[in-house]
Amino acid sequence: MIVMFQDLRDSNSSQFQVSEFILMGFPGIHSWQHWLSLPLALLYLLALGANILILTTIYQEASLHQPMYNFLGILAVVDMGLATTIMPKILAILWFSAKAISLPECFAQMYAIHFFVAMESGIFVCMAIDRYVAICRPLRYPSIVTDSFVIKATLFMAVRNCLSPISVPILAAQKNYCLHNQIEHCFCTNLGVTSLSCDDRKINSINQIFLAWLIMGSDLGLIILSYALILRSVLKLNSKEAASKALNTCTSHLILILFFYTVIVVISITHSGGMKLPLIPVLLNVLHNVIPPALNPMVYALKNKELRQGLCKLLRLNIKSN
């Protein structure tokens, strides 16, 4: 990926004057931004530790070898990838002032962020479909949501999210960066990078909006449709206990979806609105890439009885082994 962006950069070398970007970190608080390194490092370690624990539990506990938990395991891998895409560089900036990043590395990071965010959105869709079939078509669930379905759905999302965001870094790499190279951000974002371009960046903005509606819009639409059908099916149940149990299986999923998409909407509004405090959208952007990976496993562990029991069993085994 980096080699490809290096080739694109070399194709414009006659007009390229900037050889690297400087990531300045959090705008407006450069003098004391290093103090943010501790909570961010703790969040990153929590995200890695909690998701590894979830993966280990699902792998070792035979009762969790079900499609719903397979999707949760895939989500854990995606969460770790998303956090790792940005956090090592952010911590390097805050701890060692390692602010420089080459253009190919910057474009590769831009692509990876788009891939993992879209992948997380796609897995949420798969989980919503899983819950729809489990609640609305319970008798057909074993024949529809199989291991083969999980593999095919995951591969489809992976291919979709590999191909769809490739235009973002390619368009950015074809711009000429001939004046400024300081980015008031902690990592490489499309709009943050292309704002330094000497060329017109209208096509980059249009492409970003188009992809957002194409990927996030369609995913959110499918999720809303799935839960609307689930709600309609639950309201038809005569037993309040059965309705409560059915909705309870969706609670953790809905909490994570609400947080994930709400922050995306807020980030979009703050960027498009041109806030007087640029720190807010940057901070939200960073937190959106590190809080969900830390939050997701904890919400599922607290709200899901089978997973909670598996975690307790795993932790007791570890304690005994020590």
Image (cartoon, grey):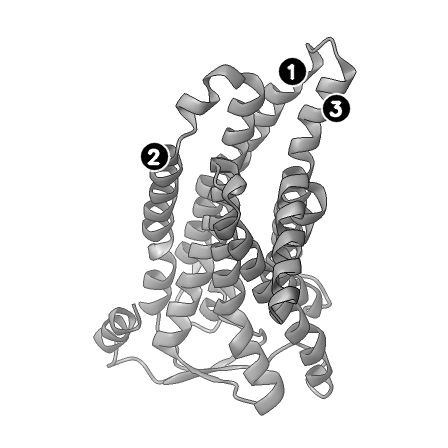
Q: Amino acid at mark 3?
A: Ser
Camera-near label (3 vs 1) is 3
| As drawn, 206 above or below 219 | below
Mark 3 or mark 1: which comes first in sequence?
1
SS type, badge 3 = helix
- The structure residue drawn at horizontal position 38% and vertical position 37%, both measured from the top left corner, is 153
Structural distance between the alpha carbons of marks 2 and 3: 30 Å
Distance from disc 2 to disc 1, alpha carbons, whole Å, reads: 28 Å
The crowding category of the residue bearing disc 3, from other C-alpha atoms within 10 Å (few below 14, some 14 to 19, many at least 20), is few
Give the residue at mark 2. 148
Q: Secondary structure at mark 2?
A: helix
- Please rate how many residues cluster around mark 1, counting C-alpha atoms within 10 Å: few if below 14, some from 14 to 19, many from 20: few
Give the residue number, with chain letter if any, for mark 3: 244
Q: Mark 3 and mark 2 in contact (Cβ < 8 Å)?
A: no
Which secondary structure lies at badge 1? helix
| Cα distance in 3D space between marks 3 and 1 | 13 Å
